[in-house]
Image (cartoon, grey):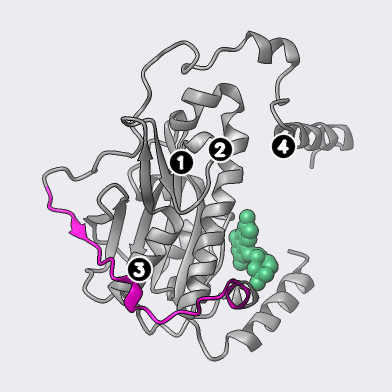
Amino acid sequence: MLDPEEQKAYTQNGRQFMKAWRYYSDEVYKAYESDQNLKRPQPPLVKAPMRPGQAPIDLPRDFESLSMPKDAYTLMRQRKSSRYYSQGGISLLNLSFLLWASQGIRDIRGKSYATLRTVPSGGGRHAFETYLVVNRVEGLEAGLYHYLPMGHQLEFLGPVEEPKGTISASLSGQSWAAKADVIFYWSCVAYRAEWRYGISAHRVVLIDAGHVAQNLYLACAALGLGTCAIAAYDQEFCDKLFELDGQEEFMVYAAPVGTISAADQAEEKAFYKFVEDQGL
Ligand SMILES: Cc1cc2nc3c(=O)[nH]c(=O)nc-3n(C[C@H](O)[C@H](O)[C@H](O)COP(=O)(O)O)c2cc1C
């Protein structure tokens, strides 16, 4: 166990990280020049396909045909974390809507200066990539996928060996998530934000991640599906699963999505009792 002084130092460090532009001393901050200021070329707005030789899968966009509550009040009231899924499977149109709601591109500014998406992002950097483990989505082979937001497409990365164990291990043993129909994983391509914000980029990226998950929550509420944000994922396992180098690109967030089990309400109460009893 760390001694109290060491614990305090780590805590202070974490608090400092959260403060606007103040993680480093004024001296360091003023002396630092971002690559944008130095007129270095901007990195690509999105990651290139990982399987360039393979035809991507076009996602349907006829979202008007989905029956959803239209008022914000209903959606916000229905938003909650759901961890108990009936394994009913979801349609490709539902998955398409969830991808669009969480990371869809609605416009591009400049020649290729920034994407505008369905979620906000500090400086329009949008440093995330979306990956999926698909268990049960109509018309999709089970396995690993990467979202290509420019064309609103998916690329198939390959099958998953032993999906239950893989999903559970990727989320640090949260085995309930293996019953989800699809699991979203968001990585961060760090330089996309660092190019502009340099040594202050990282805090902004993490704030951005919240918007992505909140839109997924609201889109799930609209479709009657369940999701749950997950920060307790296994870094190395996830990075390896999706072939990320763990330095330039690494996982930062995850969220299983599924059809909600009828027992969800009761199970949720049991879940909170369990975590409280265990002191988790
Ligand atoms: C950043 C973040 C990380 C979370 N990580 C986990 C997690 O690893 N496992 C989990 O079961 N729930 C996780 N949750 C869900 C919270 O436990 C949940 O939002 C909270 O209990 C409130 O419940 P509600 O979302 O239904 O309002 C996370 C939520 C957020 C926003």
The answer to whether residue 230 is seen in the rendering is yes
The vertical placement of 85 against 150, above or below, is below
Q: Residue at x 36, y 27 (%)?
A: 43
Disc 2 and disc 1 in contact, CB within 8 angstroms: no
Whether residue 269 sits left or right of residue 261 in the image: it is: right
Q: Quadrant of the C terminus?
A: bottom right
Give the x, y percent position of residue 120: 53, 47
Residue at image position (52%, 34%) is: 123
Please name the residue shown 50% across and 14% down the image: 37
Mark 2: give few (<14), some (14-19) or many (20+) Cα within 10 Å: some
**Marks 3 and 4 close (CB-CB < 8 Å):** no
Which numbered disc flags the more N-terminal residue, 3 or 4? 4
Residue 215 location (% of width, % of height): 52, 61
Camera-near label (2 vs 4) is 2
Instruction: Return the residue at label 3.
Output: 95
| Distance from the alpha carbon under mark 3 to that under mark 2 | 26 Å
Q: Give the range drawn in magenta.
A: 54-75
Q: What element carries label 2?
A: helix
Q: What element carries label 1?
A: loop
The label number, if any, that marks residue 146 in the structure image: none
Q: Residues within 10 Å of mark 1 (few under 14, many from 20)?
A: many
Picture disc at residue 126:
1
Mark 2 / mark 4, whichever is N-terminal: 4
Locate residue 104 relative to residue 21 in the image: left or right: left
Quadrant housing residue 154:
bottom left
